[in-house]
Image (cartoon, helix red, strand yellow):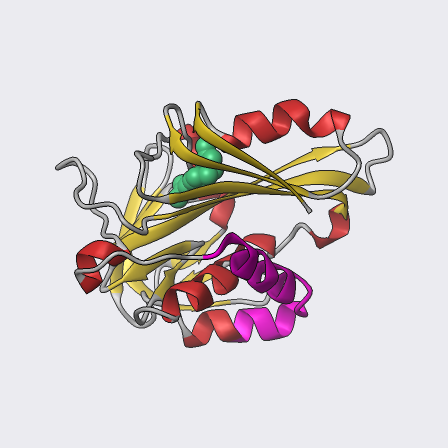
Amino acid sequence: MLVIELNKVTSTQDFAEAVSNMLYEDFIVIAKEQTKARGRFGRSWYSPPGGLWFTYVKKNFKTENIPLIGVKVAIAIMQIINNFINSKIRWPNDIVVNDKKIAGILIEARTYENIEYCDLFIGVGIDTNLREFPQDIKATSLYLELNKEVNINISDVISEIEKYINLNSKDAIEILNNNLSIKDRVIKIVGDNWEKTCKALFVDFMGRLITECGIFEAEEVYRVDVV
Ligand code: BTN
């Protein structure tokens, strides 16, 4: 598979979206450093040298398979992190170690004229060897947890993503519920100009978070914090 390796880029996601029209097969864009990386809801994503920052592009991806893709990729990334340390998924798709975020996932799609198919941009950031974070970022890295540098092979990550994106939705939701960091815990759910605090119960078959104070869709929730 084509792997485009960059030293420094604004965002692997932006680069991948810019070149995707010129390519016909799946490809990967990986960068040592990003200067304008983004997360969900256009938030900025801290990406100095030392992390694993990449976008995996699936060409001709069936649009009907987009729902729950974030859950499936999150499971794959959790399995990769679990090779080093026990991690969990904080709905909708943050990977956490002891409630501290260690990896994030941003999925974007661009449909073709025939809307049955799209280019799928799977953006993944894993805090591998970061030695510190700015004070306002509540996160951790494998280096900070293990006190040693780690090496994650991009081809292993892609194989794991491929394994789980082909998983059926029922099994994916079951794995998610078995590894849900917020299960039966009181959380603060933050959206656009609103927030609610209550106990998280489980994720339903559509990927929605069921809580004691209502049902939440991933698309409407900015952030979830353990209280
Ligand atoms: C989130 O947690 O909000 C998602 C973070 C996704 C970050 C990755 S790093 C590689 C790719 N390029 C970007 O600009 N963002 C994603």
- Is 32 in front, or is 127? 32
Q: Main secondary structure of the magenta part?
A: helix
Relative horizontal placement of residue 176, taking residue 163 as reference (left or right):
left
Depicted 143 relative to depicted 109: above or below? below
- Is 197 in front, or is 126? 126
Evaluate whether residue 196 shows in this view: yes
Relative horizontal placement of residue 101, taking residue 38 as reference (left or right):
left
Give the residue displayed 32% in from the left and 49% down from the top. Answer: 127
Depicted 203 relative to depicted 215: above or below? below
Instruction: Return the x and y of residue 107 as percentages of the image width and height.
Output: 55, 43
- Is 75 in front, or is 176? 75
Corner quadrant of residue 114:
top right
Depicted 126 relative to depicted 71: above or below? above
Instruction: Return the x and y of residue 154 as percentages of the image width and height.
Output: 51, 53
* First to last magenta residue range: 153-174
Corner quadrant of residue 136:
top left
Evaluate whether residue 100 shows in this view: no
Magenta segment: does it hold 51? no
Magenta segment: does it hold 164? yes
Quadrant in the picture for the C terminus: bottom left
Depicted 73 relative to depicted 172: above or below? above
Ligand 1 position by quadrant: top left
